[in-house]
Structures are given as C-alpha cells and as structure tokens.
Amino acid sequence: MAFPFSAIAIEECRLSDTPTQDSPLPDALRISAPAPLIDIGANLTHDSFAADLDATLERARQANVAALIVTGADRDGSLRAHELSERHDGLYATAGLHPHHAADWDPAMETTMRELHQQPRVVAVGECGLDFHRDFSSRADQQRAFEAQLALAAESGLPLFLHEREAGERMLEILREWRDHLSDAVVHCFTGERDTLYGYLDLDLHIGQTGWLSDERRGHHLREFVRDIPSERLMVETDCPYLLPRNLPAKIKGRRHEPALLPWIVKELAHWRGESETEVAQSTTRTARRFFRLEGTGE
C-alpha cells in the first residue's frame, strides 16, 4: 500500500462518536493533519495489529500520516519490522535491543543487528538505551548492550533511536563519551525533566514527543518547557499501541493507540508550543525526513 503525500481533506469532526463497522476508531477521532506527518515510532509488530494491519495503515493514510518508522526492540521484532517495511510503501524500520531485553545481547544478536543495519529500509539503530524505572534487565547488562549498539551505530553511520527512562544522568555520561563517533540520535518519547532535556539538546540530539504530553497525571511538567525544543530537533510519534492520549473527545474500544491518531498529538503539541498545527506538522516532517534520510515522503 502506497501512502500519498498530499493532504486529504476530510471533516475535522463527524457527528458520530461510535466506531464504524470496519474501524475501531469513532468518527469523532478520524481527523486529517493539515500537512503530511511522519510517525517516528510505531510498534506495528505488536500482536494487536495482526488482524487489521492493512486497515490500520489505510486509516493512517486518511489521517495524512505519510510515513511510519516501525520500531524494532528485540531480535524477532527487528526482523519483523524490516519485513513490514519491505512489504509496505511508506514504512521503514529500526533494528535494536530495548534495555528491557538487554540480558539477551550476545555475539549472535550483534551479528543479526549488524546485518539488519545494512538493509536499505532500516533507517536507525535501536530502540536501545537505558531504563532504570523498570530494571527488567540489570543495569550492568543494560549498559553493556547499549554501548555495543552505540558501536554499531558508529560503524554503520545510522542515526540512533534511543529509549531513556529515569536514567538521564547515566545516559548523558555515556553519550558524551560517544557523541563524536555518532551521526544523529533521537530520544524517543521523551518524558524527563528540563535539565535532562537541555543536556540532550546540548549534545545536538533530537527529541520525540508522544501522547504523554496530554496525560494530566504525569505529562503536565512537559508542557512547561516543550516549547524550548528547537523545531529542527523535534519529531512526533504515537508509540502505538501504547500511550493513547488521555484527552481524546471519544473513547476507543480496547484503548489501542494507532498511527491515525497522530494528528491529535500534533494538535496538543501545537497548543503548548504556541504554534499552529500546520507549523508543527511541516517542521516535524521536515526534521524526520532529514534525520532518517527518507526519500519521497513529501512535505
């Protein structure tokens, strides 16, 4: 399925707030972005998309999501993300090992990742990084796997797709040591504090924003400084099926997030940055095209 790159004019909001027979999204949530968008983090290999992936991608197209980066977070997920990127126009992949699975890093994993990083549709190393909130893998294993993937990024020249939660201080220490050997990097789904953000920006890193911004329980602090992110460093993502925005005007059965809802994140981001939705859409897409070195995704 090819994604068109011109905006699709559909109603901003329709009368019904119930799902149609062939869509889990209520009509009230089916809006189109004012300019083409790129979702830089979509977990489309998740089992929840297995039964309706084609329909999910069609809804994304109708919402004016021009391209999606499918996240690879372990060996099987990275292989499947690459497979999806080869099967569908407008899809690209990352390949890496999430810190939750860091204990799985071994020579065979490194060989698989190195091979994936040579594929044209794989556009970043990751998801990789540090997560000291969950500690599903030991911190020693996390740092070992992270530095091994930094080495692969330096070797391949690909940008990095980074995960960090409650580990900003250590992440910054490691990245400072490696920064001169790396091309670009984005801290996806940034949820940290102002000082951590400034540390990443000082290293010339990019920042990804999600529906976390709309979460009144835990995302309100981001609203105070999200406008401090330069437009040329800012990108948008759903991180679907996770992080469904909490302020949507209608409920979704099953509460599965999907790429067609990316315009709602742009709407929220534009509000707190004091910009128009068109400005945010155009600048984040321009930044993502440059960062991931994409061709043909439109402006």
Image (cartoon, rainbow, N blue to C red):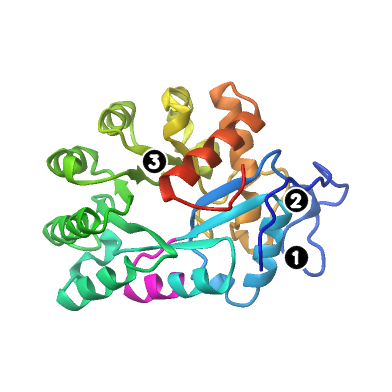
Which residue is under mark 1?
23
240 to the left or right of 111: right
Quadrant housing the C terminus:
top right
Disc 3 residue type?
Phe
Instruction: Give the numbered dot on residue 190.
Output: 3
Q: Which of marks 2 and 3 is nearer the N terminus?
A: 2
Q: Are marks 1 and 2 in contact (CB under 8 Å)?
A: yes
Q: Which of marks 1 and 3 is nearer the N terminus?
A: 1
How far apart, in angstroms, are the residues tagged by discs 2 and 3?
26 Å
Residues packed near mark 1 inside 10 Å, few (<14), some (14 to 19) or many (20 plus):
few
255 to the left or right of 86: right
Q: Is label 2 in a helix, a strand or a loop?
A: loop
Q: Nearer the viewer, residue 95 or 98?
A: 95
Q: Is label 1 in a helix, a strand or a loop?
A: loop
Instruction: Give the numbered dot on residue 30.
Output: 2
Residues packed near mark 2 inside 10 Å, few (<14), some (14 to 19) or many (20 plus):
many
Image spot of residue 254 (x, y percent): 63, 64
183 to the left or right of 282: left
Q: Residue furthest front?
A: 295
Q: Which residue is drawn at 32% across and 74% down?
A: 75
Q: Is label 3 in a helix, a strand or a loop?
A: loop
As for residue 73 lying within the magenta part, the answer is: yes
